Structure formats: C-alpha cells, structure tokens
Amino acid sequence: MRKRLAELVTDRELRPIDAQFALFIGSYDANPAVVLAAALVSRALGHGHVCLPLDRLAQMTRDAPGLTAWLGELPSLTGSLVSSPVVGPGAPLRLELGRLYLARYWQYEQTVAGWLLQPNSAPRPEVGEPLNSLFARDYRGLFQRLAQVRGPGFDGRSWLADQLDIVRSASLDWPAILTLLLAADNDQVLHELDRLVPESACLNWQKQAVATALAGRFAVISGGPGTGKTTTVTRLLGLLVSTADRPPLIRLVAPTGKAAARLSESIGAARHSLDLPPEVIAAIPDQAGTLHRLLGVIPGRRRFRHHRDNPLHLDVLVVDEASMVDLPLMACLLDALPPHARLILLGDRDQLASVEAGAVLGDICAFAEQGISPKHGWWLQRVTGQDLSAWMTAEGSPLRDQLCLLRKSYRFDAGSGIGRLAAAVNGGQVAVLRQTLAMDFQDIAQHGLAGEGYGQLLHLCLQGYRPYLEAIRAGRPPVEVLKLFGRFQLLVALREGPLGVAGLNEAIVAGLVKQGLIGRQEWFAGRPVMVMENDHAQGLYNGDIGIVLADAAGELRVWFQLPDGALKGFRPSRLPAHETVYAMTIHKSQGSEFAHTVLVLPTELNPILTRELVYTGITRAKSRLDLFVEPGILERAIVRRIERASGLQARLALPR
Ligand SMILES: Nc1ncnc2c1ncn2[C@@H]1O[C@H](COP(=O)(O)OP(=O)(O)OP(=O)(O)O)[C@@H](O)[C@H]1O
C-alpha cells in the first residue's frame, strides 16, 4: 500500500500530505478501502472541497487514472468506513449522510451551520420612519440628471423607471408623468412624483437590504461590482447608530489587507454622503482591518486569540469580500462573536470561492433563489412601503429571509461593455457574450493571441506600466507611485508557461529593461512584488503588493500601503516569500479592482478555466478591459462551473 501511495504521489494524483495522512490512518485500520478513502478525502480538501461525497467518487477522480483503477479493485468504500474504528465521534474521520470528512472540517461545518441556524428571537424593530427618510427620493439630484438627458429622443418612461426603480409600471398614469418630466423647470415641481409614482410601484433592493439586515442579527448583502454594497451597508450602519440608545461598537474587516484598504476608502467616502447628524456619521468607522488581525493570530497556532471563551469586543461586525472567507476561518469568526453581536457579510456570491476549502458565501446564498417567506415579506412591505408579493413563497429555508441580492449596477450602465460582458459570463449566456464582444463598446476590446496578438499584449503592458515608472523617475512619493501602479494590471489564469505569471513577468521585465525604464538587477527600483505568505509579526499578508524605491542615500525599501492607509517601507531582505507582480493570477486579484485590466486566458481549455474564474477576472476592471483570448475558449469556459463538495447547504436546509 505504501508503494502504491508513493506511485500516486509520483504521478501527481496525490499530494505527499494525502499519502502521509492515508498512512497515518492505515496505522490504525489497514483496510485498503479505508486507507484509500483517507487519501481521497485529504486530496479533496486540497481541491477546495470540504468533504468527500461517496456517491461522487468517479467524478472526483476522473482526472486520476491510478486512483480510478484502485477504486475499481475495491468493494464499496461506505461499507468499510461504517465499521472502521477511525470513523466516528472522537475519531479522525467522520461519515455523515454519505459524506466523509476530516473530523476538524466536520466540526467547522457544524459550527457554521449551528450559528447560522440559531433562531432569531428578537422582535423586528419598528424602523419604517427612519428607513424611509434615509431612502427619501432626492428630487434635486433627479432634476439635475433630468436636465442633462431631456432633449430629442428622450425616453422618459424607461429613464424614470430606472431612476426610481419602478417595477409596477402598468398601474401608473404615464401621460401625466411624462408631461411633468418634460415641463419641469425646477426640482420642487418633481415632488408631484410622490403622488404619481407611489413607493408601492417601486422596488429598491438597497432599501430592502437595509430593512432585512435590521430585522435580525445576521444578514448577507451580495451583489456584483458597483451594485452599492458599501453604500448600502453605510446607510445600514447610519440607521443602527441613530436608532440605538448608545452608539454600537462597529468593526469593519476584510480577508486581505488590500480588500480592507479598499473598504476603508469606499466607506470613508460613502459616510459623508449620508444625510445624518455629524455625531452619527462620526460613530461609523472609516478604517477597516483584516479578519486575521481582528481574531488575533497566535504565531504557529491554528487557534486565534479570540474564541468562544474570549469573545470579540464588538456589537456590529461587517465582513467585506466574504466570498474569500474559507470554512475554517468562518467557523473561527462565528465562534468568536459575542452572543449579542450583529454580523453582516458583504460580497459577490458569483465570484471565485475562497482559496482554501469551502464556498461558504455561495452555500449560504443558494437559498436566495427560494424567494422570501410571507411573514418576512409582509413585514418588509410594511416598513419599506414597497410591494414584494412577487417574491414571497411558502416553502424554503429560514435562512433565505436573511439574504439580500443587490441587482442593479450603479457603476456600469447599459452603455458599458464591462457590465454587459460580466452579466453574460455570469449567466453563462454564450449568444449574449458573442453579441457583446461584436458590439462597438468603448470600454472593452477583444484580441487574439496568435500572430501579432502576443506582441500587442506585451506592448499594451509596457504602456500600462510606464506611468508609475515615470513617476518614480520624477521622484514622486511612494503613495503616488503605489496609486499609479494600482491603476493598471495584467491578470492571467495560469502560473506557469508563456501565458502564465512566470512567462509574462519575464517578458515584461525584459521589455521594460530594453526601454531603459528599469534596471537588470534582481532588486531594481520600481520592482513590484506580491507577498505570498502571511507574516503576522511584520503585518504583511499573502496578496499584499509593494514597490521597491530607493531613498536619498540609494538604499532600497519595499513600500506597502497598510489597510489603515499608512505607508511602511521594508528592507528587501526582510520580506516574507514574494514574487514579481507585473502579471498576477486571477485568484490573487480577488478583493482588488483596477481602472484598466488586461485579462489573458490560456489558448487551450484547462480545468482551471471556469465561469467563476472568467467572471472574477472581468469584474476586476473598473473602466477598461482588454481581453486576450483565442476564439472559442471563452464560450467553452463560461459553461463550466466550479462545484465544491460540502454539506453546509444540506445542513442549512434543515428546518429550525
Ligand atoms: N442608490 C444609489 N444611487 C446612486 N448611486 C449609487 C447608489 N448606490 C451606489 N451608488 C454609487 O455606485 C458606486 C458603487 O457603489 P459601492 O461602492 O457602494 O458599490 P459596491 O458594490 O460596494 O462596489 P464594489 O464592486 O467596488 O465592491 C459608487 O460610486 C456609489 O456612489
């Protein structure tokens, strides 16, 4: 058995750790079926699955002929596992409903499901009045926008429907509304729309999200790029502060330093657009930190400083980019929350799941498809004044009433190619994708990679990275250099090969050297580096990006912007594992956005190419996307989905 496991490691069907674990299990139960099951469950974890579903063994080993052959020689694994001493309470493996777990992961899933399924006993608050005043129509803004669009060809009906989120259009007196819109010469007259377009004809998902989050101690607000997740949570925090007897202690976190820095920036801006008293705004924090820092990492230990017996000191916790939070980290976070705490998860459920095992946000958000319960729907209707009858269904998990999907992008309008492309990819709509790429959008361009394509790609990258290098030459300060570097990014799917991180980094460095923009040595001024592991002692985290700059004495320092906005310089020799980051994998780009993104996909279909990967790559672009892909690859990639085996959804579906 030892030999066979070693061969599977040599053939890369197993990782060394999978074989070691199987041997460890084999020392307690030498039954080959149990040993193989142990290797497979460990291997599944390496692929991001939380457990090994025993009815999907063929599917999960389809790319591994050695494992498939071994499975074929054995009787059913289930029979051997059920009677094995290594499976069961207190043993290293757990078997539940046909899913085999490492005991630790079974416990994580239990913790997460147990926390999420706790009944919400608190009465729903009476928030109608403050909620409606927070979401009061801004007629002054509406009038300004109207003045810009009114003119020949103005389609007042669809314009107003979009502006006011009208969903029950047929019931409205459109001749009167259009007359008003065309004749309005000041914002005051637009108040007549209060009567002509009552709130019950509109459906604003941001308002629904705030109400939903106020109703209980847990809520998820999920939406694509620019759908207003930060804006919505800022309004929610404003309401929580203004309606509380004493200001709640609010903490904001994200899984990476980069995502935390972005959250600080966007919440800082959103706070000031709130029409609330200054003392309320002051009680909303504008600094976010990392999740690891909040929980308190103990170097060398899996356990955090905060846990059930030493809970976090907070009343409200907002976690941004929650799709990046893996199952173990989510379990540790929920375990560390004090019983009275309110938790709000923000994220995009359609993005790539966490690097490590699990797809917690996706598993939770799966219940959003079930609509909402009538009880919750009636309450929402009462406090928001909007009609939700079309969304109410009798059957479903109680969790569905804690989920809010934001469906309208305020960043990408109908004229945006990026928005349309992202929607087509996310919906797996091949025809819309083709149509979008064939249209003449100003913000997207598709290029091939054959022939001159590769040269064009390099040219674009050399142009894109030039501004920050010129800023260095001009002696601009680190903060400005980092900002300029962050405006342009080359994203790739693979690590190896000419179109992977390694090949493209090399080609870009060679091109920049040739243009005299950087030096030839390993540590040249301007070298951008990405940290590849967490270094809690120095406050540097996997995914952080820094740039090498020389000080007045010619000494090199690598400058990083910390989540609180502060800058810190490190000697190159002090950095934890790192690599040059002209090209970055799409996986590593999660939680970041770039004004101009260049996205390169492999020329051949690869298991890594999925809808989630392409969607995540495209949605990193804020205002310009250049897509380098060979014909046919994109269409084939977007119909493939990532499936992560887990029992969380099944646990959450159970009635409370
Ligand atoms: N209801 C709204 N009306 C008008 N503009 C809005 C509204 N909600 C959000 N916006 C604007 O849309 C932009 C994106 O909003 P926000 O940053 O809140 O979205 P997000 O979902 O958090 O974005 P990201 O994809 O960056 O995470 C901001 O400029 C914001 O001011």
Image (tube, rainbow, N blue to C red):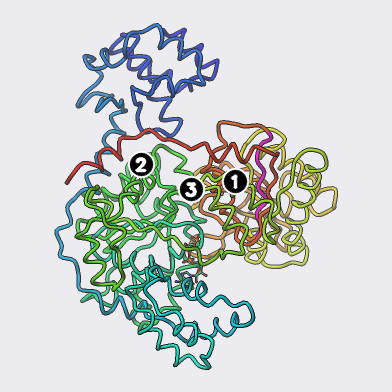
**Residue 230 numbered mark, or none:** none
**Dot in front, 1 or 3:** 1
Which sits earlier in the primary sequence, circle 2 or circle 3? 2
Q: Nearer the viewer, residue 402 or 233?
A: 402
Q: Residues within 10 Å of mark 2 (few under 14, many from 20)?
A: many
Quadrant position of residue 420: bottom right
Q: Secondary structure at mark 2?
A: helix
Magenta span: 596-603
Whether residue 81 appears in magenta in the rendering, the answer is: no
Q: Is residue 538 above or below residue 85?
A: below
Q: Nearer the viewer, residue 118 or 303?
A: 118
Q: Nearer the viewer, residue 52 or 424?
A: 424
**Dot in front, 2 or 3:** 3
Separation of marks 2 and 1 at Cα, in angstroms: 36 Å
Q: Amino acid at mark 3?
A: Gln
The residue to which callout 2 is attached is 327
Q: Residues within 10 Å of mark 1 (few under 14, many from 20)?
A: few
Separation of marks 2 and 3 at Cα, in angstroms: 16 Å
Q: Secondary structure at mark 1?
A: helix
**Dot in front, 2 or 1:** 1
**Residue 431 numbered mark, or none:** 1
Q: Are marks 2 and 3 in contact (CB under 8 Å)?
A: no
**Residue 351 numbered mark, or none:** 3
Whether residue 602 appears in magenta in the rendering, the answer is: yes
- Horizontal and vertical percent position of residue 230: 43, 65
Which sits earlier in the primary sequence, circle 2 or circle 1? 2
Q: Secondary structure at mark 3?
A: loop
